[in-house]
Structures are given as structure tokens and as C-alpha cells.
Amino acid sequence: MSNNLKVIPVDQFNSNVFRLWDKEWLALTSGNFHTNQYNVMTVAWGGFGIMWNKPFAMVVVRPTRHTFRFINQFDSFSLCGFPEEFHKSLSVLGSKSGRDTNKIKAANLTPIALDKIDAPGYAEADLIFQCRRLYWEDFDPSKFLDPSIESHYMKKDYHRMCFGEILRIHGDHEKYRA
């Protein structure tokens, strides 16, 4: 992990989360670093908040994604943010499948062990959330209140939503600490 990354208490994390999800993106990784069973994908939809008196990250994964198997099988996941120069790497993670290629190598990223969860983070990241899964639920299209939502599901591959308790945040203090 970069020397710039230090633990950021959850109540001191500071970022424009709308920009973080929509413009900067995050890498979602689930699995087990130590057994080399994990997969990563770029995510641009999700959220942060408090639920059940715990800080959480909420991510969504389609059942057609290779990461879907890992997020269901393993009890933890990481969310990693990267400096702007890694945007191309995140594009690789979002456009290639871990079923077919070693996309982590193709993205020039270095997986690293984390201290609170089995899923890896990345040495190049400037932000790492370590999360333990708390809850999941599949989207039910009969509950969509805005008809335009359905346009995101031409293949009827509705996302699975996963809430993960944020156990630790490592980040660049200059960039992410209040």
C-alpha cells in the first residue's frame, strides 16, 4: 500500500461521492487474495451511508458479470479509488471479463493483501474501503416507480444490491480526509 495511504476514520472521510461514483469510478473486488480466488470490476453505481447503525457501502452487480459469483460466495469486498492517471486501467476492468483474461495484469494493477478482509486492494489505489457483506437483495422490476429505469435492463439482467459494512478506510489524507 502506498505510503500516502493512512487510516481515515469513517466520520472524517470527505469526498464528493457523486463525482467519485459517476466520474472517477471505483474498482469492486470480491474474493480471497490469499487463495488467489477473486475478481474485480469497475463500478459507477452505488452509494455510501449509515444503515443498522453501521457505515456502509452499497454496490450493485449484474448476474451476468463474473464478479457476481465472487460477491455471493465471499463475505467481503473492497472498493478502490485511483488517481486520474489510472482511468484507462479502470476502463479495462470494466470492459474485459475475468473469465477470459487476466484483466488485472492488462490494467497494470498490483493486488495487495488488506488487514481487515480477505478481498484484495491495489497498490496503485489512493482510496480503499474494506467492507464486510451485511445484506443483499435482487432488484424487482415490479417495484420500479420510474419507467425509464427499465431501459437499463434490455436483457432483464437486474442487479443484485449488496450492502457492506465499512470496516476500514485507507486513503490519501490530502485528498480524502476532512
Image (cartoon, helix red, strand yellow):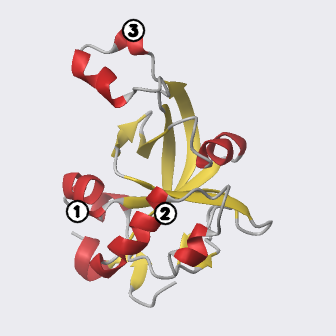
Residue at (24% x, 76% y) in the render:
175
Residue neighbourhood size for the residue with mark 3, other residues' Cα within 10 Å, grouped as few (<14), some (14–19), many (≥20): few
Secondary structure under the numbered disc 3 in the rendered image = helix
Where residue 141 sits in the image (x, y, percent)?
40, 15
Q: Can residue 122 be seen in this view?
A: yes
In-front residue for pair 14/28: 28
| Snapshot quadrant of residue 34 | bottom right
In-front residue for pair 139/50: 139
Type of amino acid at the residue the image marks with label 3? Ser
In-front residue for pair 7/23: 23
Location of the C terminus by quadrant is bottom left
Q: Which mark is residue 142?
A: 3
* Marker count (numbered): 3
- The residue at which mark 2 appears reads as 93
Residue at (61% x, 71% y) in the render:
114
Type of amino acid at the residue the image marks with label 2? Leu
On screen, 105 above or below 135? below
